[in-house]
Amino acid sequence: MRTWVKAGAGVIGAALLLAAGAGGALLWAGNQSLSKDHGALPETVAGGPGDAALGARLVSVYGCNGCHGAALAGQDFYGMVASNLRRRAREWSREDFARAVRNGLRPDGTSISWAMPTEMFAAMADNEIAAIHAHLRRLPAAGDAQPVTLKHRFFKAYHAATGELIPNAVLVRATDAGPAVAPEPGTAGWGAYFTRMACAECHNHGLGGFGSDTPALADAIQIYDWPAFVRLTTTGRPPDGRELRLMTGVGRERLAHMTDAERRALFDYLKSLSQP
């Protein structure tokens, strides 16, 4: 009996050692991916100091506080830590900040992960980048609301190793470029620009939706007249008054900060889209 017990313990010990080795190798591979230097691409931001008042509105409309916390000092975001933007804006120049937003790259060349919607923000205008940066730098300094823990590091390394956590640097298209100044609401190009910044994260490039998760906006807009659209984009409620899984929060917390001109221009643009 003792021989069988010893043999069983040996098998279990060997299995544990193999599992530990495999886990260690997986975490090592993940950390290698996360620490890869993609090159600190040059980035320029045309114009002078940003309009902090515009930036204060854009951090809501574009959803920065949805991931980085209401105070923009960071928070746990699906097992990872969305960074403290107040601290980042003080540490990074306007050009460094633009590189992170548009290209998903930190100043040291490492890539931010998929949680940052760089694919959408790659075409953000210089004046809006500068405005958000100026607003963040104006805010009082604050410590990290969510420090990075060992648990966060393991989670991130594991998902990087398994391919679930994709570096933003590989998602950005080389042809993407932001204009010096964002188009004005109602002008040519504004609808495509604004919906990429504010809508495409949930409704996909081209606004065709993500299957059963989110609808194509050319279809969704058909049930809305102007008063109903105002209600949707200020309270998040559709015509029947129910709570929507994603849009109720987005309408109430993000789109409610749109200007009247932006809201009207967005309604007109969505109505002009061809249904799939």
Image (tube, rainbow, N blue to C red):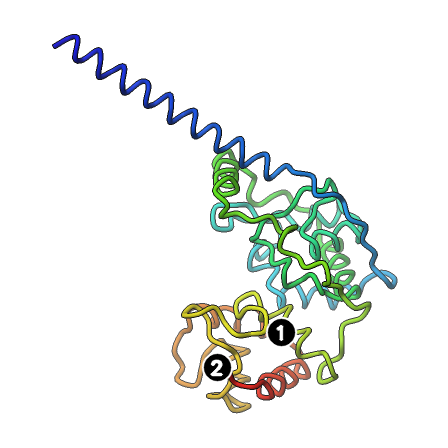
- Out of 127 and 44, give the one closest to the viewer: 44
Mark sitting on residue 206: none
Where does residue 59 sit, x and y in percent of width and height? 65, 63
Indicate the quadrant containing the N terminus: top left, top right, bottom left or bottom right.
top left
Where does residue 178 sit, x and y in percent of width and height? 76, 65
Figure quadrant of residue 273: bottom right
Mark sitting on residue 220: 2
Q: Is residue 59 above or below residue 89?
A: below
Residue type of the residue flagged with mark 1: Thr
Q: Of the two numbered discs 1 and 2 on the same chain, state the one appearing first in sequence.
A: 1
Q: Is mark 2 on a helix, strand or loop?
A: helix
Where does residue 106 sit, x and y in percent of width and height? 70, 45
Figure quadrant of residue 139: bottom right
> 28 left or right of 13?
right
- Out of 112 and 241, give the one closest to the viewer: 112
How many residues crowd around disc 1 within 10 Å: few (fewer than 14), some, or many (20 or more)?
Answer: many
Disc 1 + disc 2, Cβ < 8 Å? no
Number of numbered markers: 2
Q: Residue at x 52, y 47 (%)?
A: 165
Mark sitting on residue 195: 1
Residue type of the residue flagged with mark 2: Ala
Q: Residue at x 87, y 64 (%)?
A: 47
How many residues crowd around disc 2 within 10 Å: few (fewer than 14), some, or many (20 or more)?
Answer: some
Q: Which residue is drawn at 66% across and 76% down?
A: 192
Q: Is mark 1 on a helix, strand or loop?
A: helix
Q: Is residue 105 above or below residue 229?
A: above
Q: Determine the residue located farthest toward the left in the rendered image.
A: 1
> 12 left or right of 45?
left
Where does residue 44 sit, x and y in percent of width and height? 83, 56
Q: How far apart are labels 1 and 2 at the CA level?
A: 14 Å
Figure quadrant of residue 48: bottom right
Q: Determine the residue located farthest toward the right in the rendered image.
A: 48
